[in-house]
Amino acid sequence: MNLLIPPLEPNRQSRKLYVPVSIKFWISHGFAFAWLLFSIYISLPWLLDFSAVVSFPLALILISAIAYIPGYLNAFLIISLFFDRQPRWKQAHPSVPVTLLIAAYNEEASIEQTLRYVSRQDYRAHLHVIVIDNHSHDDTEGAVTRAAKALDLDVTLLHEKRPGKFHALNKGLQHVATPFVITLDADTLLHPSAVRALVARMVSSPDDVGAVAGSMLVRNSRASLCTRIQEWDYFLGIASVKRLQGLYQGTLVAQGAFSLYKTECVQAVGGWPNAIGEDIVLTWRLLHKKWRVYFEPLAVAFTDAPETLAHFAKQRSRWARGMIEGLTEIKPWQHPLVYTKYLTGINLMMPYLDIVYTVCWIPGLILAFFGIYWIVGLTTLLVLPLTILSFGSLYLYQKNRVFKRLGLRVRRNRLGLVLFLLCYQLIMSPVSVWGYAQALFRLKRVWD
């Protein structure tokens, strides 16, 4: 993806028949339920054969996690994305001043480039940047000072000695005087229209929208095989889930790497919490207070993905642990909106799905190579058409409705795509289980 790109072109989307979100929600569930019944019907031989080995209740529990529930969720995702039509912005060039918060720890090598991309934003209103040096041991302070002077940016440099990103962000929040605040990681690069797209979505939304999540893409996809796989995860997997959640007005993570919040909303929930997934818990607190959270696919930023499997496992296990922290603080049934109850309820099932996938499906896959189809058989392949259909439709959406408008091009990465489709979940589920175990046994938190 080439970062030397033109700004966002005007939205020329034609008006379409409006379908209420509630109707989309229940129609999507209807199709998904129909697919579930079909899956159960054709899998009865598999269910009965497996029952003879492990008992019927256990067979039903395992097959539900391997095939029934994933198939249902994939069907719900596909139909929901079919209905997804982002409303046009009411203001393409908002005039609201915005503050960007950047928490920085030992970011001497990257912070100058991040600020350079901030300076290239096509946002016409005032941008105030607050960089919070979180007790760095390198020359982060000097790099920020030099960049601010060279780029003619309005930058305020603060210092926070207490370690922890949430401490740094809360220190910065005390100095925010604008109605909107954007959090940005110190190594994240913004598309020239990224800030404008986020603010345009916010000012075009109902008053009860408290945050808008941006769209994250991988910048260093050529660094390793690991980053090649993650490029497709961000481009297809994470983006599809964000669109689904945004459609139902409950994006579950307004990620700290690049998201916009109403300042008053963040202040009302006490700022960023002391959690390893501080952005997850903050988002759920907003949702719990009846603030909706949207997603803007045209607000694109680029981040560096972990280049090694060990770093990837540490990051994703931290994400899984952050999800558990959110579920622990606010249960799905405690959310006021039905859509949010459902979306967080899916997260409540993820440990069950990941554990079964790790301890049953992966061994079952090995047994299948030896002709033993107790766990993995031909019926499990029914999930593949839905997966390919969902990813195929999302690829076309990303390419034609997002990348084309942003002046981006999709890099060729066929090997990464094949490995993503065939192997990604084999890695992701065990890593997530490790994150759940960290939360369960309250192991020491590790942010880096």
Image (tube, grey):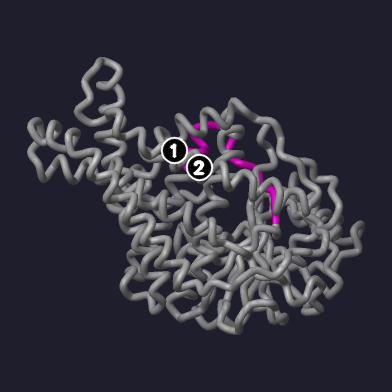
- Is 320 rendered above or below residue 289? above
Q: Which amino acid does label 1 sit on?
A: Pro
Tell me how far mark 1 sits from mark 2, CA to CA. Answer: 6 Å
Quadrant hosting residue 429? top left
Q: Residue 412 carries which label?
A: none
Q: What residue type is labelled 2?
A: Leu
Residue 438 in sight here = no
Query: Does 385 sit left or right of 81 as displayed?
Result: left
Q: Where is residue 258 in the image (x, y as percent from the top left)?
A: 65, 60
- Is 49 rendered above or below residue 242? above
Viewer-proximal residue, 203 or 135? Answer: 203
- Mark 2 is surrounded, within 10 Å at the Cα level, by few (under 14), some (14 to 19) or many (20 or more) other residues, namely some
| Helix, strand or loop under label 2 | helix
Label 1 with label 2: CB-CB less than 8 Å: yes
Residue 312 belongs to magenta span: yes
Quadrant hosting residue 104? bottom right
Query: What residue would you read off at disc 1?
Result: 385
Query: Does 256 sit left or right of 409 as displayed?
Result: left
Query: What residue would you read off at disc 2?
Result: 389
Residue 429 in sight here = yes
Viewer-proximal residue, 31 or 286? Answer: 31
Q: Position of residue 188 (x, y in %)?
A: 70, 51
| Helix, strand or loop under label 1 | helix
Q: Give the range drawn in magenta.
A: 300-314
